[in-house]
Image (cartoon, rainbow, N blue to C red):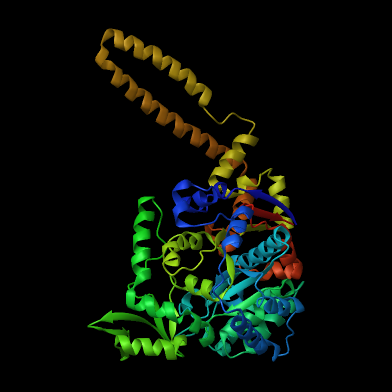
Amino acid sequence: MDVACISYHDTAFFSQTVIDYIDDAPQLRPFYKYRPDIKGFAELLANKKVIADREVLAAVLNEQYSRISDFGFSISDLVSGNIESLKTDNTYTVTTGHQLNIFAGPLYFIYKIVTVIKLAKELKTSFPDKNFVPVYWMASEDHDFAEINYTNIGGKKVQWEYEAVGATGRINPDTLRDALNQYKGALGLEGHATELADMVEKAYTGFDKLADATRYLVNALFGQYGLVIVDADDARLKKQFAPIIERDIIEQNSFKKIATTNEELEKLGVHIQVNPREINFFYLQDKSRERIVFEDGSYHVLNTEIRFTKEQLQQEITAHPEYFSPNVVMRPLYQECILPNIAYIGGGAEVVYWLELKSTFEHYKVDFPVLSLRNSGLVIRKESAAKIAKMELSTADLFIPADAIKNNWVKKHSGHTLTLQEEWRELQSIFEKIKLRSYKIDNTLAPSTEAVQARLKHAMDNLEKKLVKAEKRNYHTRLEQIEQIKAELFPKGSLQERTENFGLLYVKWGQQFIDELVKHFEPLDLKFAVLTE
């Protein structure tokens, strides 16, 4: 593939807060600590205090990976080596996290992981005396099944029809068969379709937990790059977090800190992504994940009869920390407590919500990682690239609305002059003379003259639109191609990466598709990549 890069600002698909973060806007600096560049990483590494229990982390990971190796899938030497390396003091992680979307969800799921892989490589080059392990954190405790039970491939929605409860990582995927058949059918039979079909078949029929199925699939795609996949739904990992769980539930520190931060961000015009609750933990069981609230002098698990006094709550956290599941505002803190992490890779909304969290990290004396925007990309097939070249459209042109592209194209290629700017300038000159004459006769007539001028300008603008519209009819066939290009590259008017699954791209290129992403994505450049076959 060839790659061309444009600024995130020019895509018009990213919030002003994300653009300000990329541009190092001064008003956002109080809400993070280190810039996402080599200097920022050097500063963090010089001050990093790892609180994670490395031996426990490696033991948990080895046990989790044994569940897919027992299925007959070999773990790459690079993955095994990275897990072993986590035991040493000069090894750090570069992490991204995401829900357990079936069939890897939309393309940005893939892009997030590619970004951590590439950033780990770049950091190793810049800091050769240290090791950097790319990590995918599975959001296995999340219970929002409706956000993960579908994917879109080739314009078709494939959905897992099932009434799920509790943590998604614990769901048995045995009811996924209909969706699995639909997905495999959408892949077809050409290219690498059989390879990917076999991959998803083994993933979703070989395990009794969605977390293990997802680990299998993601490892099959990225194991050769050394990606380590962690499922934090584990009692040994939760035990390290238990002191913070207890303090935060009882003292409600995250609620107070984040609420104050959100007020400050709102004053800057930042759209708040998440709002904290007084208690930011759920009570987790096999078939339920329910909020904990404080009411009537005790701690109540909603929708259950479970209640704790303060002392009983403390005893429960000590005995069963695995029953306490952090929500979206505490999960990042949990992550940084159990990983020797120096960077979190997230999408635009994630970067903004992490800005809400720094004061909570500081309260618990946990290092705040470097926040880095994941790489974004637009993949253009050879056939579409040929149409784009024939239409003489630039990379930047692709991101503007279809009507604007059409208008610009018609004005550029028409044999007629479709703008009335020159004529309007002549009319303006005439109106200046009329206004001067009116003023001399009666100085109160100036507003009337200006009103006539405004009405004429409106009429001229409408006439210009009619000229363009008439010429569009003359180029109807060519302009239809613009609609086709936009529909393919921006499904439902959104970025390709936010809608389309990776499946058909893998069918076309196989593992080379991911190789090309790793080759061309540049995590520290903070540019949007347009990849053309």
Q: Residue at x 28, y 80 (%)?
A: 294
> In the rendered picture of this protein, how many numbered marks are placed on residues?
0
Q: Residue at x 54, y 43 (%)?
A: 404
Q: Residue furthest top?
A: 440
> Looking at the picture, how far across and down is residue 276, in whole percent?
37, 68
Quadrant housing the N terminus: bottom right
> Looking at the picture, how far across and down is residue 418, in whole percent?
56, 31
Q: Vertical placement of 30 versus 155: above or below?
A: above
Q: Residue furthest left?
A: 296
Residue 479 visible (yes or no): no
Q: Residue at x 66, y 62 (%)?
A: 119
Seen from the viewer's position, the closer of residues 304 and 233 is 233
> Looking at the picture, how far across and down is residue 241, in whole percent?
47, 79
Q: Vertical placement of 401 versus 255: above or below?
A: above
> Looking at the picture, how far across and down is residue 157, in whole percent?
56, 72
Residue 524 visible (yes or no): yes
Q: Vertical placement of 275 versus 263: above or below?
A: below
Q: Going by the image, does 405 lie left or right of 381? A: left
Quadrant housing the C terminus: bottom right
Q: Going by the image, does 51 lie left or right of 245? A: right
Seen from the viewer's position, the closer of residues 325 and 45 is 45
Res 311 quadrant in image: bottom left
Seen from the viewer's position, the closer of residues 402 and 358 is 358
Seen from the viewer's position, the closer of residues 266 and 456 is 266
Q: Going by the image, does 64 lie left or right of 258? A: right
Res 205 quadrant in image: bottom right
